[in-house]
Image (spheres, rainbow, N blue to C red):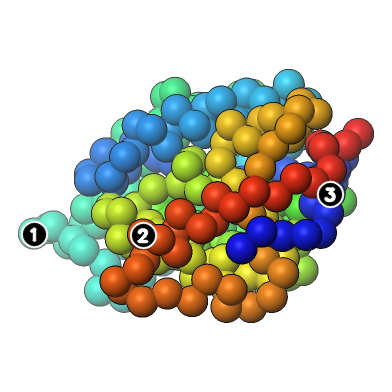
Amino acid sequence: MTSEGKSMVNKRNTALLVIDMQKESKYGIEHMQEAVDSAESLIDACRSLSVPVIYTRHVSRVDGAGLINNEVVDDSGKPIFYRSDTENLEVIDQLRPHSGEVVIDKYRWSGFHETSLDLMLRTQKIETVIVIGFTTDCCVLTTVFDAFSRNYDVVLVKDACAATNSGAHKAAILNMANWTYGIEIIDSGELINKMSGSAFTSWKATAPDLVAYSSKRIDDAYESLSAEFKGDVFND
C-alpha cells in the first residue's frame, strides 16, 4: 500500500542497529551474502554521515551460564551455536565494527532484553532506529517489536536482513509491516538515496494489518512492500 504521509529521518537522532551479523550465520542463512553486501553499503553510508552504528552479538557461553532452556548442545554439554570460545561469535569480517563503535552482547533473541541497548540509544537521544541483520524471523523480529514497545520509530531494511529460508524471511517482514505501527520498510539502495538527498521509494505503515496475507499469496503481499512512497530526504 502506498503511504501518503511524510517520512522524516533525522541523522541527529537516528542510529543503525546491526543485529547478529556474525560468522555463525554461515550455518545456513539463505541469501546471506546478498544481505551482507547490502549491509556493508548501508553501514558505510551511515558512518559517512556520523550516524551511530551499534552492533549486537548473540552469545552462548561455553560454561553454560545464561543459556536458553533446551539450547542445542554437543555430547559434552557445550552449546553448538554462537559459542563464546569460537571464532563464530565474531561479526563477519566484511562488516566488522570500527574502533569505538558499540558492540552489545546478548543472551536472548531481542537486542533489548536485559542489555544496555536502550541505555545507549537514550543517552545519544536516538528516536529512530534503522534495523538490519540476522535472522529476520527471530532476532530481527523481536528487536523490532521491542524497539516499537519502547516508542522508537523503526526503519526496516529488508534486503539487509535474511533468514534460513525465504518463506520465514517474508512472513517475518510482513508481520512487522502489519504490527509495528508507522514502520518504514525500504531497501538499502533506496535508503542510501534518501540519506544523500536523492529520490527514493519506500513503504510505510499507516494502519495495522495493511498487508494481511494467506500462504498462497505471501509472495504478492511481500512485493507490495515496494510500493512507491516519496518522502522527505535525510535531514541534518
Mark 2 residue type: Asp
Please tell me whether residue 89 is drawn above or below residue 229 in the rendered image.
Answer: above
Q: Is residue 192 left or right of residue 37?
A: right
- Secondary structure under the numbered disc 2 in the rendered image: helix
Q: Which residue is mark 2?
A: 219
Please tell me whether residue 209 is drawn above or below residue 177 in the rendered image.
Answer: below
Q: Which residue is mark 3?
A: 8
Residue 114 location (% of width, % of height)? 59, 66
Q: Residues within 10 Å of mark 2 (few under 14, many from 20)?
A: some
- Secondary structure under the numbered disc 3 in the rendered image: loop
Q: Is residue 217 left or right of residue 116?
A: left
Assign the N terminus to one quadrant of the image.
bottom right
Q: What is the C-alpha distance between the residues marked 3 and 1?
A: 52 Å
Mark 1 residue type: Asp
Assign the C terminus to one quadrant of the image.
top right
Tell me what residue is drawn at x 80 percent, y 52 percent.
Answer: 7
Q: Nearer the viewer, mark 3 or mark 1?
A: 3
The first of marks 1 and 2 along the sequence is: 1
Decide which of 60, 203 is in the foreground and name it.
203
Please tell me whether residue 135 is drawn above or below residue 147 in the rendered image.
Answer: above
Residue 101 location (% of width, % of height)? 66, 33
The first of marks 3 and 1 along the sequence is: 3
Q: Which residue is mark 1?
A: 75
Tell me which corner region of the image, top left, top right, bottom left or bottom right, holds residue 171.
Answer: bottom left
Tell me what residue is drawn at x 55 percent, y 50 percent.
Answer: 226
Tell me what residue is drawn at x 29 percent, y 71 percent.
Answer: 216
Residue 170 in sight in this render: yes
